[in-house]
Amino acid sequence: MENQIKNALLDLKELLGKGQFIEAMEKYLDDDVVLQEANNEPKVGKEVCLQAEKELLATVTDFGGYQMKNIAVSGDTSYYEAVMDFTTNDGTKHHFEQVNRTQWRNGKIINERYFHA
């Protein structure tokens, strides 16, 4: 299982690095996924998560990049550090540094939480 997760993370690293967030979500999110940003209310369900991401991406005017580093896998759970930069249509530059904790089942993400710095 750990090798399957490591391979999925390497694929995600490539997709996210290119800004292909929707493609990554369509490929790896379980239908019943739960995603949670920091202490915000979790989003439940693949379609809800995809819609929220599409709404966010519609505001992005410049994608500065997404870096994934320091990947670790233990059983069905993975962790990694991520750095993301983008600018939205109101001119705001966003810089996120976070740790992602992801739980996997059958090659799909079933639960993911983003811890921001």
Image: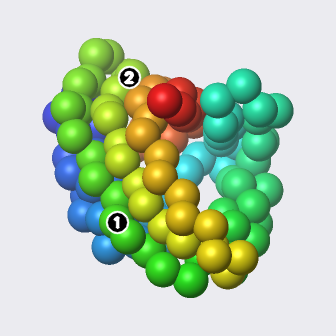
Q: If the image is split into quadrants, where does the N terminus sit?
A: top left
Q: Are marks 1 and 2 in contact (CB under 8 Å)?
A: no
What residue sits right under mark 2 in the picture?
76
112 horizontally vs 49: left or right: left
Closest to the observer: 113 or 87? 87
Q: Quadrant of residue 66?
A: bottom left
Residue denoted by label 1: 65
The answer, for residue 20, to whether it is visible in the render is: no
Q: Which residue sits at x=71%, y=76%?
A: 90
Q: Which amino acid type corresponds to the residue marked 2 in the rendered image?
A: Asp
Q: Residue drawn at (42%, 30%), measured in percent from left and top?
A: 99
Q: Vertically, is 44 above or below 58? A: above
Q: How many marks?
A: 2
Task: Identify which residue is drawn at 27% across, 47% down.
Answer: 68
Residue 107, position as x, y percentages in the image:
39, 43
First-in-chain label (1 vs 2): 1
Q: Quadrant of residue 37?
A: top right
Q: Residues within 10 Å of mark 1 (few under 14, many from 20)?
A: some
Which residue is painted at 62% across and 67% down in the image? 92
Mark-to-mark CA distance, 1 and 2: 27 Å
